[in-house]
Image: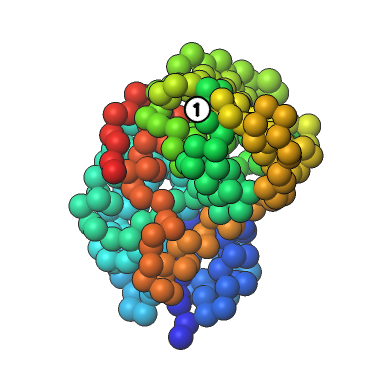
């Protein structure tokens, strides 16, 4: 059986990551693409062999839709694709403002359709092992977490001319683009509810309208997390983590996440952290094939991460 995937928007920075993930998954193919920019659309159609489609006209034989358009258009674009009655992957952030995030979340919830979003850190095995350790209580009470997630997209130029650099289209700058992953990771680890505290945003390179780097305190019951994120690191994607618990710690050693249980306990290597945004699509593709959506991000979880990142105290906490 062939699963046909429709892609709404082909200029997102992770566009190629998702194309690669679909193309290397047996039985899946990108069948149709649409974008507001005709030149980019033409190039994408040529590269994938897909066909152009009209978002207002549902197509038979399609299995799911990936919404990768400009964040500011998500409310408008979602209204069109909901008529297709298909599972939907909506790239983060869900909306360019808190109002739009809530509009998107309500529309998804009311539809009852399968949903997923691009929180790809959940697919990293070492971070899943960390979740087990924290959830089991082996690290004790978690009093402090530091997560630094950065890349060199602006400094190296590979984000040049992308709509994600325009705050009116993206809704966030460099901090919000990457910090949302950190916030979701904290929530996924069970450190919730989350409340964003004092923050500082900088435009270090001066090449974007919005901030290109930022630091924020995020509190949770019993502890505080420091989140650092942005686009102006000196190298490629980097995730640095430190977790301090009353019974143990987590920390990075090179590319590996290491756990230490006890005051002077043995170190346990939880594995290397390899960052591939395309991997975030795997739970969604698995759901399409199997009908099991349990590994996908629930809409309530996505909403909380979005609102906390936007600086809003979100008290939605679903079991």
The x, y position of residue 289, in whole percent, is 43, 74
Looking at the picture, tell me which residue is in the foreground, 49 or 203: 203
Q: Position of 10 compared to 206: left or right?
A: left
Query: Which residue is drawn at the image coordinates 58% and 58% (left, top)?
Result: 279
Q: In the image, is residue 239 above or below residue 2? A: above
- Residue under circle 1? 141
Answer with the quarter of the image where residue 316 lies. top left
Left or right of 195: which side holds 38?
right
At 23% from the left and 57% from the top, the residue drawn is: 111
Say left or right for 251 vs 53. Answer: right
Pick out the residue farthest to the left.
Answer: 110
Please identify the quadrant where the C terminus is shown. Answer: top left
Out of 110 and 156, give the one closest to the viewer.
110
Taking depth in this image into account, of 21 and 275 the one nearest to the observer is 275
Q: Quadrant of residue 67?
A: bottom left
Can you name the residue that lies furthest to the bottom here? Answer: 1
**Residue 72, percent across and down?**
40, 40
Q: In the rendered image of this protein, does residue 186 appear above or below residue 89?
A: above
Residue 207 percent location from the top left of the image: 66, 27
Q: Quick check: 245 above or below 297?
A: above
- Residue at 73% from the left image edge and 39% from the top image edge: 267
Local secondary structure at mark 1: loop
Q: Residues within 10 Å of mark 1 (few under 14, many from 20)?
A: some
Residue 229 visible in the snapshot: no
Q: Residue at x 52, y 31 (%)?
A: 140
């Amino acid at each position: 059986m062939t699963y046909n995937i429709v892609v709404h928007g082909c200029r997102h920075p992770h566009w190629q990551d998702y194309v690669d993930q679909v193309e290397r998954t047996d039985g899946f193919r990108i069948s149709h693409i649409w974008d507001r920019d005709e030149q980019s659309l033409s190039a994408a159609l040529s590269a994938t062999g897909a066909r152009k489609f009209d978002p207002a006209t549902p197509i038979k034989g399609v299995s799911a839709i990936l919404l990768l358009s400009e964040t500011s258009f998500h409310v408008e674009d979602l209204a069109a694709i909901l008529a297709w009655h298909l599972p939907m992957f909506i790239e983060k952030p869900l909306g360019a403002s808190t109002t739009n995030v809530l509009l998107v979340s309500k529309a998804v919830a009311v539809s009852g359709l399968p949903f997923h979003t691009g929180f790809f850190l959940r697919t990293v095995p070492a971070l899943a092992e960390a979740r087990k350790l924290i959830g089991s209580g082996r690290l004790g009470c978690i009093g402090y977490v530091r997560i630094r997630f950065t890349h060199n997209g602006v400094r190296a130029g590979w984000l040049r001319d992308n709509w994600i650099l325009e705050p009116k289209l993206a809704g966030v700058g460099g901090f919000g683009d990457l910090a949302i992953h950190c916030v979701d990771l904290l929530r996924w680890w069970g450190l919730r509810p989350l409340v964003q505290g004092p923050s500082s945003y900088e435009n270090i390179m001066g090449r974007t309208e919005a901030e290109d780097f930022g630091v924020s305190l995020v509190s949770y019951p019993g502890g505080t997390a420091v989140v650092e994120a942005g686009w102006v690191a000196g190298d490629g994607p980097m995730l640095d983590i430190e977790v301090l618990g009353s019974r143990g710690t987590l920390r990075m050693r090179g590319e590996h996440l290491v756990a230490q249980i006890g005051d002077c306990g043995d170190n346990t290597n939880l594995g290397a952290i390899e960052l591939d945004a395309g991997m975030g699509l795997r739970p969604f593709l698995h759901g399409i094939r199997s009908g099991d959506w349990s590994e996908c991000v629930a809409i309530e979880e996505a909403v909380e991460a979005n609102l906390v990142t936007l600086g809003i105290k979100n008290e939605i906490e679903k079991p």
